[in-house]
Image (cartoon, rainbow, N blue to C red):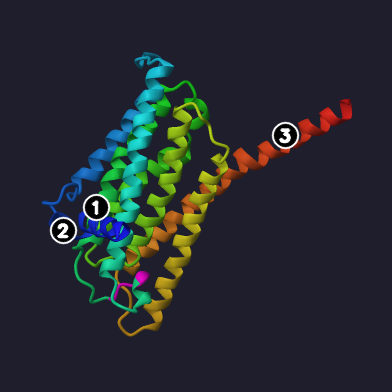
Amino acid sequence: MKMETLYSSTHYWLVEHPSISQFEWNYGYTLGSSLLFPTVSVFIYLSLTLLALRFSPFLPTFSATALHRITTVHSLLLCLLSLIMAVGCTLSVIHQMPRHDWKWIVCFPTNHTLPRGPLYFWAKFFYLSKILEFIDTLLIILSNSRSRRLTFLHVYHHATVPVICYITLSSANSQSMIHVAVITNSSVHVIMYAYYFLCAMGKRPRWKRLVTNCQIFQFILNFLCGVATIYYHLTTEIGCSGVGILCFNMIFNTSLLLLFLDFRSKNYTNNMIIKERADNQKKSVY
């Protein structure tokens, strides 16, 4: 009985609440819906990042304790927000999916309605959360380990994802599979920010590699789902909605996949080789 009450309460607040169930993406009215919003946000992000790296000696200094506290709060906040987005979007899919129509998960029919309802509320929430993630870069720059951690992959990923989200939400036709990206990415970020939170608390987990592997897995999964969408689009009479934007997203996800594979190779495979050589040298000494 308690589980049913918990589910009903969760379902109401994350799906049936009027502000969520009646949500509609309207250009110029919805928060973040104007083209100016992502343009200015990304421009400011890239400008401040470049300026901070160029003039790093002039940046204010924070104690390690202060940075750990800020990182702890930031990581915990994004971990919880990611969890809420993953659960909310999953419940929205269950709520909006036509009965027994599993194809709908990867293929919205071309006569699908405009972006409205709980599913698109969470897509908008996901889009705005990517602006909040800009703080990740600030924390890296303010820390002493920025030369080791701030990479092209990090900046490229943070700068382009909000743009991709905006294009997806603003397209004339609802994009098939938009919820798959929200659920998979939010789920991965629950693990990632939980890891950062524990590190900031001074308890470094041993599953750092799991975070990277999960990120790689999400890109592969999204790509495979995209292939399924294109297949249904070409083999059904009605076709699937938003395939053009989907193909663009698949190219973007492929670029991220290649960058993450390169990151994994440099940070884990090479480290394993170095560790094995060190172990062999120790054995030869003894």
Q: For numbered disc 1, what is the local secondary structure?
A: helix
Q: Is residue 170 visible?
A: no
Residue type, label 3: Lys
Residue 217 located left or right of residue 5: right
- Magenta residue span: 105-109
Q: Is residue 220 above or below residue 278?
A: below
Instruction: Tell me which residue sits at (85%, 31%) in the image.
Output: 283
State the residue position of label 2.
Answer: 23
Crowding at mark 1 (Cα within 10 Å: few <14, some 14-19, many 20+): many
Residue type, label 1: Lys
Q: Earlier in the sequence, mark 1 or mark 3?
A: 1
Comparing 278 with 259, the one in front is 278
Q: CA distance from mark 2 to mark 3?
A: 53 Å
- The quadrant of the rendering that contains the N terminus is bottom left
Q: Earlier in the sequence, mark 2 or mark 3?
A: 2
Instruction: Tell me which residue sits at (33%, 85%) in the image.
Output: 237
Comparing 173 with 181, the one in front is 181
Q: For numbered disc 3, what is the local secondary structure?
A: helix
Crowding at mark 2 (Cα within 10 Å: few <14, some 14-19, many 20+): some
Farthest bottom residue? 237
Q: CA distance from mark 1 to mark 2?
A: 10 Å
- The quadrant of the rendering that contains the C terminus is top right
